[in-house]
Amino acid sequence: MNELEMPRELMLAWWSVMGLFVGSFLNVAIHRLPQEGMTVSRPRRSVCPSCDRSLTWRENVPLLSWLVQLGKCKGCGWRIPWRYPTVELLTACLWLAAALATPPGDWALLAVRVLVLSGLVVATFVDFAIFEIPDEVSIGGMILAPLLSLAVPSLHADTVLALRFSEGGASVDRGGALVGCLAGMLVGGGILMLIGWIGKRIYGRDAMGFGDVKLLCGAGGFIGPGGVVVALVVASLVASVAGVGNILRFLAISRSRTRQRRSRRSFGRSLESARIAGRYVPFGPYLALGIGIALLYWNHVEGWF
């Protein structure tokens, strides 16, 4: 059966399953990109990070292999981190969300959206692991955004600037989409560079990682300047809540250790230590959340604002 002839329920299931398999590939990228001397294609076969044994296809079936093996390597018994099934399930859910949010029949737009969402998953988990965003995602997005905007103008169908620079102004053409893309990249990179410059002037230290700048610059090419603003607002709000939670977590740990050691350390000193330790929260994952929301649900978010 051709995909175009599928009932909608079957089509949604198909995209979910495809997302599950792509999530397995994303796990490879998340593990290898931070490793020196490794790439997504080298080594060619997946291996156990603990015993370096090459995995068979039966051990690479997304989610199912992890369940059958009870979350352990068949060779050495190494406990497979929860990240692996989490990434696979998350990617499947994101691909399903993209299929639900995209107008039926617009396969090109859906393909671009799932590509962007998959890149955001890689950026999120690598940033959580090593506080860096891979250039393969951020710079790759900066290169692909103009090309895909020209190929799929509907990507900027709701970008006001793209409509204004399109002939007739009724729908977005390739020229208008390119203008919306470049404006989004300029705003995305520029606004974070400005925030970083102001933060450094005020606090005397880097307030914004350049990886975040590159990520939002590349993403701006897909979501336009308005989407960049929405993504940044969402990211800032969620990151602030996460930051406060992180400080409270470190404060609870500090006070617990103080009680165990029967130390006389004051609450104020514990709070200061927790504030310093808790402020180191990677911003990339929260940017990725905001970008994903702007990419799929721009009309809903615009209504909220």
Image: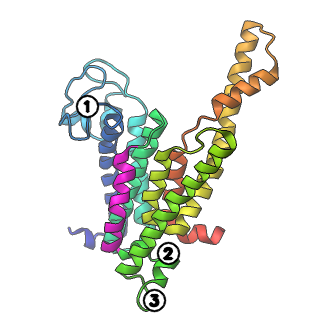
In which quadrant is the N terminus drawn? Answer: bottom left
The mark lying in front, picked from 1 and 3, is 1
Q: Position of residue 163 (x, y in %)?
A: 47, 82
Q: Position of residue 285 (x, y in %)?
A: 51, 46
Label 3 environment density (alpha carbons within 10 Å; few <14, some 14–19, many ≥20): few
Badge 1 amino acid: Gly
Badge 2 amino acid: Thr
Residue at the image point whose x is 46% and y is 78% from the top: 162
Label 1 environment density (alpha carbons within 10 Å; few <14, some 14–19, many ≥20): few
Query: Which residues are drawn in magenta?
Result: 134-152
Q: Which of 86 and 108 is in front in this view?
A: 108
**Real-space Cα distance between discs 2 and 3?**
12 Å
Residue at the image point whose x is 45% and y is 83% from the top: 165
The residue where tag 1 is placed is: 37
Q: Is residue 24 magenta?
A: no
The residue where tag 3 is placed is: 170
Residue at the image point whose x is 34% and y is 24% from the top: 72
Q: Earlier in the sequence, mark 1 or mark 3?
A: 1
Q: Which of 116 and 104 is in front in this view?
A: 116
Labels 1 & 3 near each other (Cβ < 8 A): no
Q: Give the structural element (helix, strand or loop) at label 1.
A: loop
Label 2 environment density (alpha carbons within 10 Å; few <14, some 14–19, many ≥20): many
Q: Where is residue 230 in the image (x, y as percent from the top left)?
A: 58, 62
Taking the image as shown, residue 187 lies to the left or right of residue 98, namely right
**Real-space Cα distance between discs 1 and 3?**
50 Å
Taking the image as shown, residue 200 lies to the left or right of residue 43, namely right
Q: Is residue 146 magenta?
A: yes
The residue where tag 2 is placed is: 159
Is residue 140 placed above or below 295 in the rendered structure? above
